[in-house]
Image (cartoon, rainbow, N blue to C red):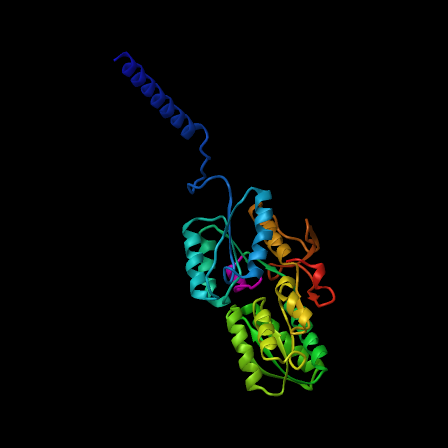
Amino acid sequence: MKAKKIVTMILVFMCTALLLTGCGSSSSNAPKADNGGKADKKVVAMVPKVIGSPYFDTCAEGAKKVAAEFGFEFLYTGPTSADAAQQVNIIQDLINKKVDVLIVAANDAQSVAPALKKAKAAGIKVMTYDADSTPDARDLFINQTTPEILGRHIMDNVAKEIGGSGEYAILTASLTASNQNVWIKWMKEQQADKYPNITLVTIAPSEEDQQKAFAQTQNLVKAYPNLKGIAALSTVAEPGAAQAIEQLNVIGKIKLVGLATPNGMRQYLKSGAAQSATLWDVGKLGYLSMYMAKQLLDGKTPTDGMEVPTVGKVAYKADNKEIIMGEPLDFTKENVDTFNF
């Protein structure tokens, strides 16, 4: 009986100690809350066009790194396909979660604008990156380069590879992608200005899906027997197009340029299925986006030529509230091994 009594006393003592410890923890170690009921830690959410894309995931890694440096909580979530309606639903969910900053690559500038305006009305700092919304729906746009520079550059690459004459096609992400439509506008301008003997036969969507890009390329090659070149304007479209060129055994006959990561295109550049892939340092785009989120939260206005750590000097267009990271970069079989992203 004495042994049982001792055991009971020990158990009572241990339970009491645990209860006291729990009470002390909840009162002294719990994070302070602001007026919205959130912890002091700022929450920054990044919403890509589509989740699982190597391009956007690499961008998110750059953003995540600097978010940790600033002590932000970083949320990365997006639609499973390049669908504006899905993206709007995700934005609404993040508004309900009362995030502090929302960074979105818009699938459709017009479709996402009302949701972004709603976020602004709720006191959320709203930014776009990679693909803009309507300017009135956000506080800042982080642009990788200017649409004119990029569009003219890609057209020059097409002309170089097909010898300045002949038919080519554009393989875009989606027909409503605002950034790609502006690039295409400038491609057409450059074509009209410098390459009168080149003809654009069609613009085909791939919906940010590599297999759809593969299928569309097969269709293009069959539908246009005189096709000499393809410009693939998304980082999953160019690898898909390159796969199709290899499978159809038209390496050398169809020249392929576009936008893609060096890792995504390395094997195709070396095989000759693609001649170049143009991009920028995607990780730095994510880093820059998060750095500017901190500027907004601190109430600071960007300046033209400002120096950003790890990124360098960036341009700022005050009239459009747009940050421009820099010039495009071409990856070829000669230099692709010097890059790893």
Q: Position of residue 301 (x, y in %)?
A: 62, 51
Q: Quadrant of residue 221?
A: bottom right
The C terminus sits in image quarter: bottom right
> Residue at coordinates 55% horizontally, 57% vertically from top-left?
57
- Asked if residue 66 shows in the view, the reply is yes
Q: Is residue 185 magenta?
A: no
> Residue at coordinates 68% horizontally, 77% vertically from top-left?
158
Residue 261, placed above or below residue 203: above
Q: Position of residue 104 (x, y in %)?
A: 52, 58
The N terminus sits in image quarter: top left
Q: Nearer the viewer, residue 317 or 330?
A: 330
Residue at the outermost top position:
2
Q: Quadrant of residue 8?
A: top left
Query: For this view, does 228 lie left or right of residue 219?
Result: right
- Asked if residue 129 shows in the view, the reply is no
Q: Position of residue 62 (x, y in %)?
A: 60, 52
Residue at the outermost left position:
1
Q: Would you say the magenta stretch is mainly helix, strand or loop?
A: loop
Q: How many marks?
A: 0
| Boundaries of the magenta span | 129-138
Q: Quadrant of residue 35?
A: top left
Residue 142, placed above or below residue 244: above
Residue 9, placed above or below residue 118: above
Q: Position of residue 68 (x, y in %)?
A: 57, 44
